[in-house]
Structure formats: C-alpha cells, structure tokens
Amino acid sequence: MGALTAVEYLSNYMDKKLINEFEMLLGKDRVLSETEELLCYSYDATSKDFMPDAVVFPLNAEEISKIVKLCLKYNTPVVGRGSGSGFSGGSLPLKGGVVVSFTKMNRILELDEENMFVTVEPGIINGDLKYYLSEKGYFYPPDPASYEFSTIGGNVAECSGGPAAVKYGVTKDYIAALEVITGEGEIIDTGSKTVKNVSGYNLTQLFTGSEGTLGLFSKITLKILSKPEANSLILVSFDDINNGFNAAISLLKLRNRPSMLEFMDKSSIESVKGYFKSDIIKIDGNFLFIVESDGSREEVDKSIGEYEKILKEFSPIFLFVSGKDEDKKVIMDARKAISPSLRKYGDLKINNDIAVPINKIPGMLSFLEETSRKYDIPIINFGHFGDGNIHVNIMLDKNNAEMVRKGETAKYDILKKTVELGGSLSGEHGIGLEKKEFMKLKYGDYYMNVLKNIKKAFDPQNIINPGKIF
Ligand SMILES: Cc1cc2nc3c(=O)[nH]c(=O)nc-3n(C[C@H](O)[C@H](O)[C@H](O)COP(=O)(O)OP(=O)(O)OC[C@H]3O[C@@H](n4cnc5c(N)ncnc54)[C@H](O)[C@@H]3O)c2cc1C
C-alpha cells in the first residue's frame, strides 16, 4: 500500500444531524466539530495525520454506550483516544468519524488495599497513577518511556511495556478486569478482583492489546504490588558484543534477576554521550547496559554485588555502580533521550519495535548491521534486552526518495528476519496502520480470518477503529 494521505481517507463529512445528537447528549462544551479544534486530534506519534469529523468527551460508560449507538445509527466510525502518543497509528481516525477522547475520564475510582487492586478510569496518565500509588506505599510496574503522558486506557489497548518488563512483565500482567463498551453499544465487565479466574474465555486478555479495535474501555481494574524499598543501578559497557551478550544472559539466570536490563548499540551510545553530563558517569564502547536491582535495601546490596562480580568476569571497559537518585536520573534521562536524539541521523524515522527470543538478539543485531551496510542507511538499535524487545530505528532523509524506498525495503527485510527467528512483529507498539501489511509475513489466511471473526463478534458493523490491524 502506498502512502496514505488525509484527503484520501477523509470521510464524507459527518451528517450534521449526528453532531446535533451528540450535542443534545453531552452538551455543546463536550463536542468539538470546528476544523481548528479537530486538528489537535488528527495525529499521534507516527508522522501521519487523519482528520476526525467530531471529537466527543464522555464522562461514563452510559454516555459511551449512547455515543456508540448513535454511531451505529449513522454508520460512522468511532475511535478511542488517550494522549495520542501511539507509535502505530492506533488513535488516528483513518476513515474519519468520531474520536472519543478519554481526557475527562481520569479519576481513580477505588484503591482496594486489602485485595491489592486499584480501579481507574481509562484517561488517567500512567505517571499520575504511579505517583498516587507510590505515596501510599504501592507500585504499578508497567513503565513505558511515555509514562509521564500516556494514559492507562492507551497502555491497555497497546499492552504497553517498558524497562520493568524484564522482572515484572507488561500491562497484560496487571489487568484484572475491564468495563468495555462493545461495537454494539453493550456494556460488559470482563473480570473480577481475583488472581484466579477461569470462567469461560479470557476476554480481559483478549481486549488487552486489541489496539482499540474491539471496544472502548470505561473502567480498568489493575493489580498492584508493594513498593520496593530501594534500588541501585549499574552502567556497564563492552567492546566485545559477545561478552556483553553472555554477561547479560548470566544476569537473567539469577534468582533475583535485574528489574531493568536496557541496552544500547554503538550509535545509540554516540547519540546520547552528551547527555551524560556528570564527570563520573562516562559511556563508551560498542554495547552498553543499564542494569537495575530493586527490593529491600539488603536484597539490593546483595544483588548488585552479585551482578558486579558476574559482569567483571566478561571484561567490561566501564562499570559504574550507584544507589543515588540523582545518578539514576542522569542515566535514565539519557536513556529516554535516545529516541529524540536520533534526529541528527535523519529527519524521517522508521521505528520498529520488534521482539525476538533473547538468544537470537546477537543474530538479529548482526543482521541489522548487514542491512544498514547493504542499503547504506543508518540503522540504530536500543531496547529492552531482558525481553528481547529491540527498537530498530531506520533513519532517513525524507526528501531523498531513493533513500526512503531503501528504508521501506529494509523494514520489510527486518520484519521478515524477525519472523524467521521466531519473533514478534511488535513487542509493545502494536500493528495499527504501521505494520498491517506485514501481518501476512507471520500469519496465514486461516489465522487472519479468526482475528476478523473475533472483531465481528464484538463489532458486527465494523465501526470501532476500522482499518487497523487488518
Ligand atoms: C516518546 C515516546 C516513548 C514511548 N515509549 C514507549 C515504551 O517504552 N513502551 C511502549 O509500550 N510504548 C511506548 N510509546 C508508545 C505509546 O506511548 C504507548 O502505545 C501508549 O500506551 C499510548 O497511550 P496513549 O494514551 O497515548 O494512547 P493513544 O495513542 O491515544 O491510543 C493508542 C491506542 O489505544 C486506543 N485507546 C485509547 N484509549 C482507549 C480506551 N479507553 N478504550 C479503548 N481503546 C483505547 C486507541 O484507539 C489506540 O488504538 C512511546 C511513545 C512516545 C511518543
């Protein structure tokens, strides 16, 4: 499929009667339909944009149900939107229609301290929830790098993950129950506040990672943990990639595995060197890891000693240990800065968040180097070593058509190789618009039809976020 343009996919302009019905339902101040207002809801973190015909701001499940029923009546697409930080185009209204913004549904509804669950509305920002829980001594681990601005609803829809996944898992590991409005406007509750639940099919997990295509979440119940008392970090780099790889594998085998095991390749290291402002913390080498241990102070000190001893056996060229918050901030700010810093390598980025089995990471990294050489384009890699999730950044000059074409071919080669290595097309960003044409690399017709039939079961008229995944 060629590049999609907004004009190509603009809907036939929404029936004015539908906008009037929304205004009657929600009041004029919770319905937007002017072009300049709609523009703010037309883009996400991809470089694509599609104009909605209206944006609505519901306050509860009943209102969402009525919105969906009106959309059914007018056969109009309806697309959920959290903060619009998605990397796969999930919140883009590809075929126009109504964007349902969850920004006004951002309350914490219940903190159940006895059962260790928290129930929230979908529009709450991940970081706000983390902060609220932390003040009370609790911990919600999923930590996408976007945690300061992405919503829990968006996190559930994309099954977001982050550095903590290596020890704590990703969003799906924390969802106990969802209240969902289906494509028929029905309100369903998928789970319960229990760790065990085998009552029919596991719809909670089916909706998690469904990329906003099966229904809209209005309430989310999450498992929470007690907050770890302490954490310490090790920054370590290697010239020999195999040494680095073997050292990391050794850490993952430990009883108290790291709570973070992030890696950067040489180009990522070069790209953020300037962000390590401290005189003490220097980074260099071909392969760098940020290793964290968390738990009680005693556990952390013991683990960090153990990690340090193991890492030293693999001839690192630099090793820095710290339990100080200020050092962690410098290191994590630099880690978060990799993505924006890559602009120096090109003004167009093809961002792939592939995941491969951990023992295939060296093979994948060699393949990425070969691909970079083959097409003569920068390919820069960093990510979450402990879960095999590599952020592959193909950096291009957007005005160089030949280079962009090569970048697209490289993307195809990389996704094909990922599948050959037994990996996943997306570790955390989802398929959305960005990878839907590559689904056939992994899945045959039968499998794709099963997915389509599942969608039909919840959304027979295909109005919920149409045009994504398939
Ligand atoms: C700088 C940066 C760093 C990032 N780092 C990470 C990372 O480390 N890990 C990671 O996993 N992702 C990361 N992301 C991607 C993105 O932040 C996540 O996918 C996030 O979960 C999206 O949340 P959002 O609120 O912005 O959702 P949106 O982008 O608004 O929407 C994402 C999807 O969720 C659906 N949706 C939103 N709310 C609802 C709802 N209530 N009901 C049903 N569907 C809904 C939308 O329809 C869409 O399909 C990053 C993005 C940026 C820009």
Image: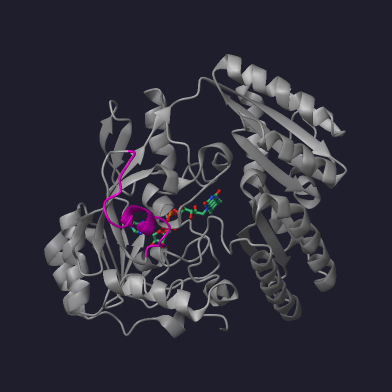
Say which of 277 and 220 sits in front. Answer: 220
Where residue 94 appears, as percent x and y from the top left, is 42, 75
Where residue 424 appears, as percent x and y from the top left, is 59, 61
Residue 73 in the image: above or below residue 56: below
Where residue 145 appears, as percent x and y from the top left, is 55, 45
Q: Is residue 87 visible?
A: yes
Q: Is residue 317 magenta?
A: no
Residue 115 in the image: above or below residue 88: above
Residue 63 figure quarter: bottom left
Say which of 449 and 186 sits in front. Answer: 449
* Quadrant (top left, top right, bottom left, bottom right) of the N terminus: bottom right
Image: magenta residue range: 195-212
Query: Measuring 62% from the left and 62% from the top, which residue is drawn there?
Result: 352
Query: Measuring 83% from the left and 65% from the top, which residue is drawn there?
Result: 370
Left/right placement of residue 114 relative to residue 175 reads left
Secondary structure character of the magenta stretch overall? loop
Residue 391 figure quarter: bottom right
Query: Measuring 52% from the left and 46% from the top, which residue is drawn there?
Result: 144
| Quadrant containing ligand 1 | bottom left
